[in-house]
Image (cartoon, grey):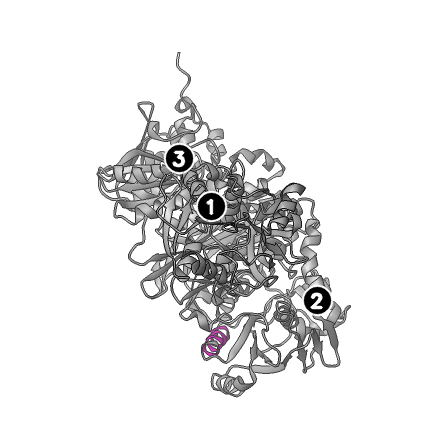
Amino acid sequence: MRAAVIVFPGSNCDRDVAVCLEAAGAQVDMVWHGDTELPSCDLMVLPGGFSYGDYLRCGSMAANSPIMREVVARAGTGTAVLGICNGFQVLTECGLLPGVLMQNRNLNFVCRNTRLKVARTDTPFTHLYAEAEEIIIPVAHNEGNYFADDETLKRLQGENCIAFTYAAGDNPNGACLDIAGITDASGRVLGMMPHPERRAEAALGGEDGRRLFASAMERLA
Amino acid sequence: MSAPHVNDTPITPELVAEHGLTPDEYEMIVAHMGRAPNFTELGVFSVMWSEHCSYKSSRKWLKKLPVDGPQVIQGPGENAGVIDIGDGDAAIFKMESHNHPSFIEPYQGAATGVGGIMRDVFTMGARPVANLNALRFGQPDHKKTCHLVAGVVSGIGGYGNCIGVPTVGGEVNFDASYNGNILVNAMCVGLARTDKIFYAAATGVGSPVVYVGSKTGRDGIHGATMASAEFDDASDEKRPTVQVGDPFTEKLLLEACQELMSSDAIIGIQDMGAAGLTSSSVEMADKGNVGIRLDLDKVPCRETHMSGYEMLLSESQERMLMVLQPGREDEAAEIFHRWGLDFAVVGELTDTNRMVVVHEGEIIADMPLKPLADGAPEYDRPHTATPALPALDAQALTHPLDLGESLLRLMGGSEMASRRWIWEQYDSMVMGDTLVGPGGDAALVRVHGTNKALALTTDVTPRYCLADPVMGGQQAVAEAYRNISATGATPLAITNCLNFGNPERPEIMGQFVGCLDGMGAACRALDFPVVSGNVSLYNETNGRGIMPTPAIGGVGVLDDLTKAVGSAFANAGMSVYVIGETHGALGCSLYARDVLAIDTPAAPPPVDLERERAHGDFVRAQIGAGHISCAHDVSDGGLLCALAEMCLPQKIGCAVEISGDHGFWFGEDQGRYLVAIAPDARAAFEKAAAEAHVHIAQIGLTGGAELTITDAMTISLDEIAKAHENWFPKLMGF
């Protein structure tokens, strides 16, 4: 699998996700946001961080970076996209995924492990998880409170686009329907607030995140 | 008619005093200059000779601290200290205060404190890998406390989270002495290769002096002078001297500097911190024994009509000064421009040993460098030792609460309650190498791509330092040593941040001298030298000083991270031992303060440095041998609170089979650890202790969901957890 990790000014989980992708066996290209051409790849990754310092609105300026035109175009032809945390915010800002990520309900940044329920397993990112399996993945964000209008939420449910939810009682930000991550209808575009790359080896406390990269490696290679 | 020039301002005794200079100091400046300084020159001298930049009250005593060791690559005097952690890797670290700005404007004060200390570390070629902090606030119910806690925590998180460096540890105390003077001490630790370390010294006459980073504005002018004065009720008016941070720009600056540092274009580099362009250019030129000429018309500014005086003294953040190899300017400019940062050649090195500043075509300052850099007077201020206090008379005490009630009061009180409310607002995991984050003894951060880890901690117990500065100084170093040893790591070196009141008062100066004496003795006894540090004096409001607070930042290394142990019980059926003798020292204990409500001061627990070292060596050896499955330092709250702290994280209880009085369970005798030992390792552990002449005592067995002491106490972990976890959210209103 070839993966392109897009580096925006202010991205800070770009190295972390590249480490996990390489550990899974992928060949990784780091692509500068100002570039206009993407190398040929099977997966595009929008990493976590504070692109453009979160100024204006999280992800909004990154969504207008030159490389994003190419990312959106490739996604349209079926190349898989993974957006983590700030990357999820960019995906909603550029329209590849619906809804918005508002400030956390308690108005504070939150960094801790969360229990997640895997809600969709027929995607290239989640097929190695069991349906309804509970896993632990950490969050670290100030704007992770997923919101969409009722019609959109119904559509997400109807099209089986909710990939991960926070387990009962463990919603850290007030997100609608406890949503932690969603996909497009095809399942090939995944945006999620939790950071699978932070729990992908035993030394860091657990390996639940590793299977996401292993899934992609199996299906997208 | 042209506008009047700032240098037309006449130099009056009042103006000299406003610049924080004494008449004698002014006369020394005139002697060094060979003439009266003009307004700009007076400003430059005043910041370079401020307490903050010149250490004029503290230098005499700082020189007595041990700064050498085979592990030391760079001791105090550079932007940060550097130690060798083996395999060609170096750890670069420092701690610094941002107390005064944080009290006036908590969010920006704390944020720029974090930004400043990170620049000190990455200036030296390191990539910052961990941030820690040491925070002190006023009484929990003081009207400003919640506002200050919320602002400081949010500022620390706002900066560190954005730049993407994990905040992995810290400590927090509350005391009335900090009501008008909170302490915000930030520590940063970075990693570099030992052969790729960058220093400040500028060499090569004619080499270009380059300004990179953000533009210069009027913020923070005279911040260094403000940090060298007492507060009064009008301090809020100083809000405009607090700088404003932009972590996004700092992230770009970090990446651009790292990129340029991978070449050999840089001769010297210095962060523009306190006293901005002035101190960075003076320090670089002085260390290289050259002169410097600056052309202020080339300095990128974000405000118009700034005078040379303002540009020289601005403390705008996220700026660096570099001296480049001649001819490498274009290559360097390309990197900084690509990262969207300003890059300007603003001067050159000369052979004059003078600092010459040109603005709008005329020379506005022309000063000899040596007196600026190290000509500030060194004061031997009068100091009176803190009188020795009697030991607390344990016989005379009556205990108002039983053991369980006392435990709940301490675990749910301001000093010991869980700090989760704080550390969940810090990104403690970014960079993917945090093995142990906040909440344990020392944090463990893997050296990226290796099997090694750094052990990091911040420690000091101000109430001990107040009662007995020498003992308190020793204890702060010893506790850092213990916290690192409890993970299995070898303690290597410390940084410090010495927060005290007004040094012009002999009793405060006596606290300073005493604490440094104690620290020095402990550092020597434990082979734990000081490689960097910072002094913050004048922490007083309306004549009331803070408790002496010499915060220690300790760094150790674990060569094989798979050998690390945690501080919490992980399994039932383990034998729990206490290492070190328990005499029941209640003087200065939290129990005496919060349960007995004793307000007559008493002697703190004594530190026996020889035993401290023996116990540390023993614990590390036993962890290395695989005999210890978890280890925890015994400090605030004594044995029973330490036991509770080991039970709570994984909800594994403990049944204690020995009996003791309140002093036994809550005394804060030093040099102790609690460890859990698997059944099959007990014999080897006990034999090793006997051979090493280390006192150990088995006190109980892990298991269950309660903490029990036979015939004396049974308390569910849920009840302790409730008290422990609820205090902070309740204080902060959610």
| SS at circle 1 | helix
Viewer-side residue, B477 vs B509: B477
Residue B370, image x, y percentages:
31, 42
Q: Quadrant of the C terminus of chain A?
A: bottom left
B525 shown above or below A179: below
Label 3–label 1 contact, CB within 8 A: no
Please give the label number shown on residue B44. Answer: 3
Residue B396 visible in the shown view: no
Is residue B127 shown in magenta? no
| Residue type of the residue flagged with mark 2 | Ile
Query: Which mark identifies residue B115?
Result: 1
Mark 2 = which residue? B720
Q: CA distance from mark 3 to mark 1?
A: 24 Å
Tell me the kind of residue under disc 3: Val
Q: Quadrant of the N terminus of chain A?
A: bottom left
Q: Is residue B13 visible?
A: yes
Callout 2: helix, strand or loop?
Answer: helix
Tell me the magenta residue range: B610-622
Residue B218 point in image, percent of width and height: 47, 31
Circle nearer the viewer, 3 or 1:
1
Query: Farthest residue toward the top?
Result: B1
As measured in the structure, the alpha-carbon distance from the residue carrying label 2 to the one carrying label 3 is 56 Å
- State the count of labels: 3
Say few, some or many: other residues with alpha carbon within 10 Å of mark 3 (under 14 / 14 to 19 / 20 or more). many
